[in-house]
Image: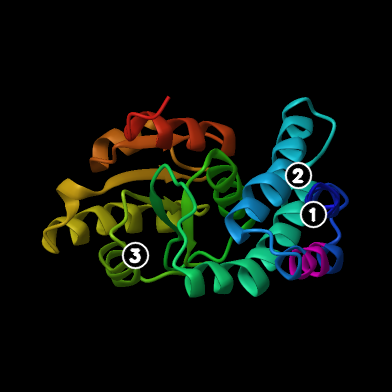
Amino acid sequence: MSHEVLEEMKNAVVNFDVEKAVESAKKALKMGIDPVEAIEEGLTKGLRIIGERFEKGELFLMHIVAAAEAARRAIDEVLQPEIRKRKAERKILGRVVIGTVAGDIHEIGKNLVAVMLFIAGFEVFDLGRDVPVEEFVKKARDVNANIVAASALLSTTLLVQREIIEALEAAGIRDKVKVIVGGAPVTEEWAERIGADGYGADAMEAASVAKRLLGVK
């Protein structure tokens, strides 16, 4: 029976069904299924299927975003509060603070990177868009982040990525945090010039770079 509910959760993500994802997550908890197991064996499996289909060119960006929304709602509204209550820990590769930099309101690319990082096994703290430099630094310190990922889609906001690195240095935590930068105008040369640790040309690459920076296979 528990297998059926986990399958239901997986299918809700694959079918982009937010209500079903939330409903089946509630059902899983009522049946005594561990919330961490519900994430790993239900929602994450669904996201992996979507990710594979996206890689093969069978799905588009909007599908990834829709599937991610279904999983996110089930986690945020149902499973995460229960995990906190039980003090259970989802086995994670590391903690990533991600956001689109101040002055930039583009979110789709950043959302996709956040999803791919989550699928890969990271705990992701998404600050949203138009995020001030000091908010990246504060969150990184608060959650003891391993990685800060900063997205800039406008050439006019590129410099903010450098400001984030400088602010992490000023806060005395730069040596503890790897910085990944990305976005349409970002290049590997730019990443090197500002002292970033990694650059992701797309969401799949960003997840690979994050794993490499933390020495995860």
Relative horizontal placement of residue 30, taking residue 140 as reference (left or right): right
Considering the whole magenta stretch, tell me its main secondary structure: helix
- Decide which of 68, 188 is in the foreground and name it: 68
> On screen, 170 above or below 195?
below
Which residue in the structure is indicated by mark 1?
9
* Image location of residue 207, percent across then percent down: 50, 37
Q: Amino acid at mark 2?
A: Gly
Q: Element type at marker 2?
A: helix
Circles 3 and 1: CB atoms closer than 8 Å: no
**Residue 46 numbered mark, or none:** 2
Question: Residue sitting at 72 percent across and 28 percent down?
Answer: 55
Q: Amino acid at mark 3?
A: Phe
Magenta segment boundaries in residue numbering: 21-27
Check residue 43 for magenta coloring: no
Circles 1 and 2: CB atoms closer than 8 Å: yes
- Decide which of 26, 14 is in the foreground and name it: 26
Which residue in the structure is indicated by mark 3?
136
* Image location of residue 6, percent across then percent down: 78, 51
Q: Residues within 10 Å of mark 2 (few under 14, many from 20)?
A: many
Mark 1 or 2, nearer chain start: 1
- Decide which of 53, 90 is in the foreground and name it: 90
Q: Residues within 10 Å of mark 3 (few under 14, many from 20)?
A: many
Q: Element type at marker 3?
A: helix
Relative horizontal placement of residue 76, taking residue 46 as reference (left or right): left
Residue depth check, mark 3 versus mark 1: number of the one nearer the observer: 1
- The quarter of the displayed image where residue 103 is located: bottom left
Residue depth check, mark 1 versus mark 2: number of the one nearer the observer: 1
